[in-house]
Amino acid sequence: MIDLRRPGQRSFGEGLIEEETANLWEPWMRQADQVLEVEQIHQRMVQLAVENQVVQGRRMRVDTTVVETNIHYPTDSSLLGDGDRVLTRLMKKVTAIAGAIGTKLVNRMRSVQRRVAEIARASRAKGEKGKQRIEPLYRKLLGITGRVVGQAKRFSSEIASGVKRSSDVLKQARLEGLKCAIDEMLETVKKVTYQTKARVFKGDTHVEGKILSVFETSTEVIRKGR
């Protein structure tokens, strides 16, 4: 641990006067929008404090608060459905800007919704019988998801290569933003597909970095009790 307390201090903030910390503010704010992880923020804060000789930086005590995320109950089928829906929506927006040039959008959401509903009904049956009913349905849903993902990859590639483009500067910037959103969701759907296959076909429920929401990917399960 790194101690941010100076000799005689009972806490990090005690005794720090405005003149000592003012010179940290601007460099810290410039760095804050460049880091994504809390650990990186802490490390940068300590580094700036040590560089400016505000503290010795031997140990640091950190307290955190858990914040509940607003998500629906996560099931593999619903997560796949969410990913398909978001990718389809993004591709619709791309088509609205770039027109029908390049890969044509094929909307598979009706098939996705049917498979998700079928899995929900089949999941009520427990034991081996329920497993036998669910596995073929998941194979169908994963197959549809694979086709949605393949189509989204082509959309992303065509934006990058200039096949899907706009002569309007603002619309072109919008296309670039949509490409980033598609790429990010593709990575999330890839993880959801992996954990779905692991649980449904291999019985592995402890996949590292499990996705609980395609919208709040940082959400983690907190297990209470023993």
Image (cartoon, rainbow, N blue to C red):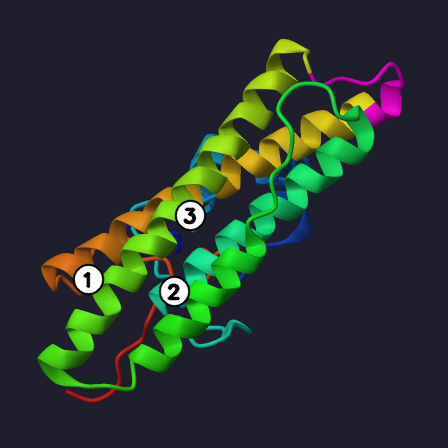
The residue mark sitting in front, 3 or 1, is 3
Residue 124 appears in the rendering: yes
Relative to 180, 216 lies left or right: left
The disc labelled 3 sits on which kind of residue?
A: Ile
Q: Can residue 52 be seen by looking at this rendering?
A: no
Q: Amino acid at mark 2?
A: Ser
The percent coordinates of residue 158 (x first, y second) are 61, 17
Q: Is residue 80 magenta?
A: no
Question: Tag 3: Cα neighbours inside 10 Å, few (<14), some, or many (≥20)?
Answer: many
Q: Please tell me which residue lies in front, 176 or 98.
A: 98
The residue located at (49%, 73%) in the rendering is 67
Q: Position of residue 102 (x, y in %)?
A: 66, 19
Foreground of the two, 21 or 135: 135
Q: Given the current orientation, which residue lies at the most extreme bottom position?
A: 225
Percent of width and height locating residue 10: 40, 68
Q: Residues within 10 Å of mark 1 (few under 14, many from 20)?
A: some
The residue to which callout 1 is attached is 199
Picture quarter with the C terminus: bottom left
Say above or below: 89 vs 134.
above
- Residue at disc 2, secondary structure: helix
Residue 160 tag number: none
Residue at image coords 19%, 62%: 199
Q: Residue at x 45, y 73 (%)?
A: 117
Where disc 1 sits, the SS reads: helix
Name the quadrant containing residue 224.
bottom left
